[in-house]
């Protein structure tokens, strides 16, 4: 027998944002799989439902997945939730979704509020899309900053804003790390949102230093929209000449040298022209 896993979007703050479909999915579920069962219990009380719940976190996922797959195999309907927003987005629930689909069970979605799109709407940043980075690794600090640099470089290269999540006790650190990057990205701006959809909803925008100064005692999880990122500069002519010279010294053919130039970001036609023009005399 095949069960159903229903991925249910939950409010990011205001319980009134729970959709009728989401409420129905929670009421009809044989089991509610929650990041925090206390949060799920509050949500169930709000809709006047009493359903069994079980926790699913990054710490217990390995043991929980087999148990939940067994429930699906028995034909149960499971509702997957998270503390706020869409499950499986920067959330351990992704592991259960992948496992359920791999085992041949039906996976459905009931869309709901998203901190990512809400923060983008509040930031007022124009563009044809965005790059979502989620949470940076908490440690080690060196790996964390490298990850941030890569995300910022990719975002700048695409000409898109970058969206990050951060815990309140680390947001000052993140703003400091972003401030370090303003030398390379002088137009870098941050719109930091917290408590979205709640009574004390707040958005602080400006340079990383300005935002940090306005948040002396951070509370609540943050969603940051980083914009004004400079695109990466292309390789210089000297660099390209050096690549061609190295390729020639290694005995590479014109085609292989052109392939090397293409990896460096040069278009096909220009790469072949450079490779043939730099033949040894």
Image: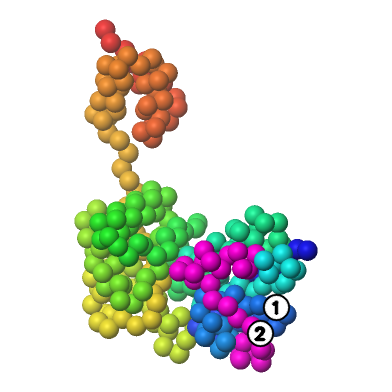
Q: Secondary structure at mark 2?
A: loop
Q: Are marks 1 and 2 in contact (CB under 8 Å)?
A: yes
Q: How many marks?
A: 2
Residue 214 is drawn in which quadrant?
bottom left
Residue on which disc 1 sits: 30
Residue 162 in percent (x, y) is at 40, 60
Q: Position of residue 255 (x, y in %)?
A: 42, 18
Report the front residue among 223 and 235.
223
Residue occupied by mark 2: 51
Quadrant of the image occupied by residue 147: bottom left
Looking at the image, which is closer to me, 126 or 176? 176
| Left or right: 263 in relation to 141 | right
Q: Check the image and report above or below for 133 versus 153.
A: below
Gap in Å between the C-alphas at discs 1 and 2? 7 Å
Q: What residue is shown at x 38% (from left), y 35% (from top)?
A: 265
In this picture, which residue range is highlighted in magenta? 44-69
Q: Residues within 10 Å of mark 2 (few under 14, many from 20)?
A: some
Query: As displayed, is residue 22 above or below residue 63?
Result: below
Q: Can you see residue 138? A: yes
Residue 112 in view in this figure: no
Q: Is residue 244 magenta?
A: no
Q: Is residue 181 left or right of residue 81?
A: left
Q: Is residue 176 left or right of residue 231?
A: left
The image position of residue 72, as x and y in percent, is 70, 67
Q: How is the image coloured?
A: rainbow
Find residue 164 and report its image quarter.
Answer: bottom left
Of callouts 1 and 2, the N-terminal one: 1
Q: Residue at x 45, y 27 (%)?
A: 268
Left or right of residue 176: residue 272: right
């Amino acid at each position: 027998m095949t069960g159903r896993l229903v991925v249910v979007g939950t409010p990011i703050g205001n319980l009134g944002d729970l959709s009728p479909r989401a409420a129905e999915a929670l009421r009809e579920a044989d089991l509610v799989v929650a990041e925090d069962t206390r949060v799920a219990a509050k949500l169930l009380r709000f809709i006047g439902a009493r359903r069994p719940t079980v926790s699913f976190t990054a710490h217990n996922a390995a043991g929980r997945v087999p148990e939940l797959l067994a429930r699906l195999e028995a034909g149960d309907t499971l509702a997957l939730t998270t503390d706020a927003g869409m499950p499986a987005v920067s959330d351990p629930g992704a592991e259960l979704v992948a496992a359920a689909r791999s085992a041949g069970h039906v996976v459905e979605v009931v869309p709901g509020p998203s901190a990512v799109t809400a923060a983008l709407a509040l930031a007022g940043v124009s563009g044809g899309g965005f790059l979502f980075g989620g949470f940076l690794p908490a440690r080690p600090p060196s790996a964390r900053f490298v990850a941030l640099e890569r995300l910022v470089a990719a975002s700048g290269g695409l000409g898109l804003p970058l969206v990050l999540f951060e815990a309140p006790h680390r947001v000052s650190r993140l703003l400091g790390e972003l401030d370090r990057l303003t030398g390379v990205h002088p137009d870098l701006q941050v719109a930091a949102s917290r408590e979205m959809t709640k009574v004390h909803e707040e958005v602080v925008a400006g340079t990383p230093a300005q935002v940090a100064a306005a948040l002396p005692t951070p509370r609540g999880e943050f969603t940051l929209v980083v914009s004004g990122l400079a695109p990466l500069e292309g390789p210089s002519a000297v660099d390209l000449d050096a690549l061609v010279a190295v390729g020639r010294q290694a005995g590479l053919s014109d085609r292989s040298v052109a392939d090397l130039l293409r990896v460096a970001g040069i278009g096909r036609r220009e790469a072949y022209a450079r490779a043939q023009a730099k033949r040894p005399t």
